Amino acid sequence: MRDSSVKLLSHPSTRIEPKSMGKQRVLSGVQPTGNLHLGNYLGAIRNWVEGQSQYENFFCVVDLHAITVPHNPATLAADTYTIAALYLACGIDLNYATIFVQSHISAHSELTWLLNCITPINWLQDMIQFKEKAVKQGQNVSTGLLDYPVLMAADILLYDTDLVPVGEDQKQHIELTRDIVIRLNDQFGSPEKPVLKLPQPLIRKEGARVMSLTDGTRKMSKSDPSELSRINLLDPPDAIQKKIKRCKTDPIKGLEFDHPERPECNNLLTLYMLLSGKTKEAVAAECQDMGWGQFKPLLTETTVEALKPIQQKYQAVMADKGYLESVLREGRQQAEAIAHFTLSKVKTALGYSTPL
Ligand code: AQP
């Protein structure tokens, strides 16, 4: 790496220890469907980073999922690289993790087909995310959107994953993955010799559901048409200041957590707590007598400071495209070997002949 600020990133070929050593395996991913926001960071990536040394980790950029809603082919590849660079910038360490791009490994699509054929269609029609996104798209809902959770199941199952760290919104999809495993093992394996491993969700309570800045009852989301609804990890300080200044609040004096009629207040205090690293009790005591006029600049400064190191590291990673490419190339090689082994196991269990 040319830039000294990214010295902490290890080059893929200079790792200091093997990543597995009998550890439980973790897999998770983010779609390249837009700018990563504080919900993606606090609900998912920050937890990946905090737990990474305990596990053998696979983090993918799930670009096949990205086309389940209308997408722009002119930006898909660049968005994919941006997400991979942000993984590194947020602190994913190659000593513990493999980073790769989902579409670079054909086993994801192939296992999806096999799993499709044992997944009842009504299981997919019941998924909350499908119903919500389908409503937004009206007549143009693709089969891919309905099939999104089966592709996600394939992502998880290909790597014999033990744990899937996600935000609360993805819990139903992990439950569906488990149902698919149980069905497949039941039909094509035996209790002594299951075909696929049963994964568990790993959902942290704090940050599991970061809410929109413009409506504290809806989750912060990349696809919300209003830019003011979310803070992106790459937002400059003036954009962060503007978004917090304009965010929805209430007229009640004094700030408090967990009040059922103050969802925005709870969300903003939670953001302050998570980004400052203070405890809930300390934040409750610090902010109990504050008005919004005093709290908003405090939250702005805390957010800007928390995102500064991520933004600096991101710039350094993006300045060396060769490095990022080498990370993804090696990631693909490592992930592909495992994925193809699992795929072969499933094909054998389903009765397929071996390729000649
Ligand atoms: N608001 C959120 N709070 C906590 N966690 C969240 N995640 C997403 N939004 C929040 C978690 O981020 C990870 C990656 O999500 P994704 O990009 O794969 O898809 P998503 O959940 O659909 O995220 P978005 O931002 O809402 O994207 P769009 O608008 O494109 O659908 C997941 O672990 C998710 O739980």
Image: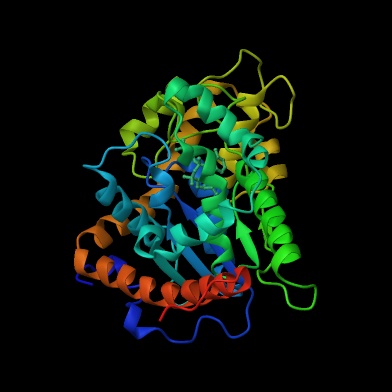
Res. 295 visible in picture: no
Picture quarter containing residue 329?
bottom left
- Residue at (52% x, 45% y) in the render: 148
Of 155 and 297, nearer the camera is 155
Above-or-below relation of 325 to 40: below
Q: Quadrant of the C terminus?
A: bottom left
| In the image: residue 211, left or right of residue 34 | right
Residue 253: x and y in percent read 66, 17
Where residue 327 sits, quadrant-wise, is: bottom left
Pick the residue in front: 206 or 75.
75
Residue 295 image position (x, y, % from top left): 54, 29
Which residue is at 61% across, 59% downward? Answer: 164
Image-based side of 347 in relation to 5, left or right: right
115 and 304: which is toward the camera: 115
Rendering coords of residue 100 (x, y %): 39, 65
Please, is residue 334 above or below residue 112 in the view?
Answer: below
Vertical placement of 337 versus 78: above or below? below
- Residue 9, placed above or below residue 183: below
Q: Is residue 317 visible?
A: yes
Residue at the spot x=46%, y=27% of the render?
A: 229
